[in-house]
Amino acid sequence: MNENSIVNHYALIVEDIPEINHWLANMVQQVFPNITIHQAFNIRQAKILLHSKNTYLYAFIDLGLPDGYGVDLIKEISVSHPNTVQIVTTIYDDDTHLYAALRAGAQGYLLKDHPPELFQKYLKQLEDGIPALSPSIARKILAHFHNHPTLIDKPVVALTPREIDVLRCIGRGMKISQVAQCLQISEHTVSGYVKEIYRKLNISSRAEAALEAERRGLTS
């Protein structure tokens, strides 16, 4: 993704502490100078912004918000804005918050205690379709699957050739619009394939789909 491709797009920051909200906005603006930043300090403000006609390329969401749980907002955005890449920015590094966020549709999970240069490094990876994950979070995810081998060894569910094509694209970090362009089909058709893939695989997030694509050897 080059800078020209993100002109006229927006990034949403949802963080209740003003100093951290502004810090996050500054980090995102430095990495993506052509993106317009919208800041919300609670879920209510975030929903007002999301109901506008703006196209949000990224949403950076805190979990502990004064008027609700960030995971619930992630679920809502996953339905209403399926092309928006959602990254959790939080102090919580426990399994409960992590897996709840991933199941809801988060595609990244960054801890807010990183130095600025490191935080920006993880943000820049988004341009290449690489999930923004703090190292300790990535290790937790790997350990989770190591400790639950049945998640890896479960039988391979049959998918149609086109569903496999879509899953391969998801595994490579593509958004719905990019999958549509790659496969030369409509975004509506891609969304239909994604829903069917989720149903067949009994999953509910892009993170789980990406793991399944890797398990099937579709990302190499």
Image (cartoon, helix red, strand yellow):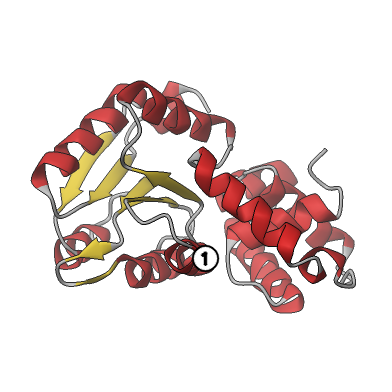
Residue 176 place in picture, x, y as percent: 58, 53
The location of residue 80, given as percent across then percent down, is 40, 67
Viewed as shown, does residue 179 lie left or right of 18? right
Task: Tell me if I can see residue 184 in this picture.
Answer: no
The image shows residue 182 at horizontal and vertical percentages of: 70, 42
**Closest to the observer, 103 or 115:** 115
Q: Residue at x 16, y 62 (%)?
A: 42
Q: How many numbered marks, from 0 up?
A: 1
Give amino acid for label 1: Tyr
Viewer-proximal residue among 193 and 102: 102
Q: Is residue 66 left or right of residue 169?
A: left
Farthest residue to the left: give it: 18
| Quadrant (top left, top right, bottom left, bottom right) of the C terminus | top right
Residue where numbered disc 1 is placed: 99
- When asked about the image quadrant of residue 36, the answer is top left
Please indicate whether residue 215 sits to the left or right of residue 80 in the image: right
Compared with 191, 179 (above or below) is above
Q: Residue at x 31, y 32 (%)?
A: 28
Please tell me which residue is depicted at 32% across the width and 51% down the height of the picture.
91
Residue at horizontal 35%, vertical 73%? Answer: 72
| Corner quadrant of residue 208 | bottom right
Q: Is residue 93 above or below residue 23?
A: below
Q: Quadrant of residue 117?
A: top left
Q: Tag 1, which secondary structure?
A: helix
